[in-house]
Image (tube, grey):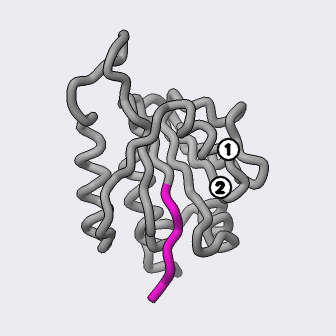
Amino acid sequence: MLKSKLIHPQLLEAIGRAGHGAKILIADGNYPAGPRLGRNAKLVHLNLMPGVVSCTQALEAVVSASPVEAAVVMQYAKTGPYALTQDPPIWAEFRGILKGEGFKGDLQPVERFAFYEQGEAPDVAVTIQTGDQRIYANLLLTIGVVM
């Protein structure tokens, strides 16, 4: 029996094999997870249907099982068809979940293509493809240390 919220066997295995400094990518339903998969990353599909499973649900499960040292988000466009004038609402949800688990940092925005590069890096242990339809709902976590 498990006590954490995370009970998905593939995710538990991937996170269990990772260590301090390894990365976990929680990707929304629009993220090109297949073509942008890191060479060492395990791809776990949680995209059952549009909106299910959400990035926030995946985050809640992941942080119940692993400490977080850093959190990077994809910077939103400030011009063009998907432009925003303020942080996407999901970022506040990410902050709340992370803070609730003791994370003391803040989200670090990274330009879209630089985010893709970070998501393909060899230190990414797992990419979680969700069905989340909200824009800019991608989150790259760095695993911290269990104190």
User: Looking at the image, which residue sits at the far bottom?
Assistant: 147
Instruction: Report the amino acid beneath label 1.
Output: Glu
Instruction: Report the amino acid beneath label 2.
Output: Val
* Depth order, front residue of 84/89: 84
Task: Give the residue displayed 70% in from the left and 41% down from the top.
Answer: 37
Question: Residue 94: percent from the left, percent from the top?
Answer: 31, 51
Contact between labelled residues 2 and 1, with CB atoms less than 8 Å apart = yes
Question: Residue 11: percent from the left, percent from the top?
Answer: 61, 61
The number of discs equals 2
Q: Quadrant of residue 67?
A: bottom left
Task: Give the residue displayed 52% in from the left and 68% down from the top.
Answer: 143
Label 2 crowding class (10 Å Cα cut-off): few <14, some 14-19, many 20+? Answer: many
Q: Under tag 1, what secondary structure? A: loop
Residue stretch in magenta: 141-147
Task: Give the residue displayed 36% in from the left and 10% down from the top.
Answer: 81
User: Label 1: which residue?
Assistant: 120
Q: Which mark is residue 124?
A: 2
Question: Residue 121: percent from the left, percent from the top?
Answer: 68, 49
Question: Does the stretch in magenta take in 86?
Answer: no
Q: Under tag 2, what secondary structure? A: strand
* Depth order, front residue of 48/65: 65
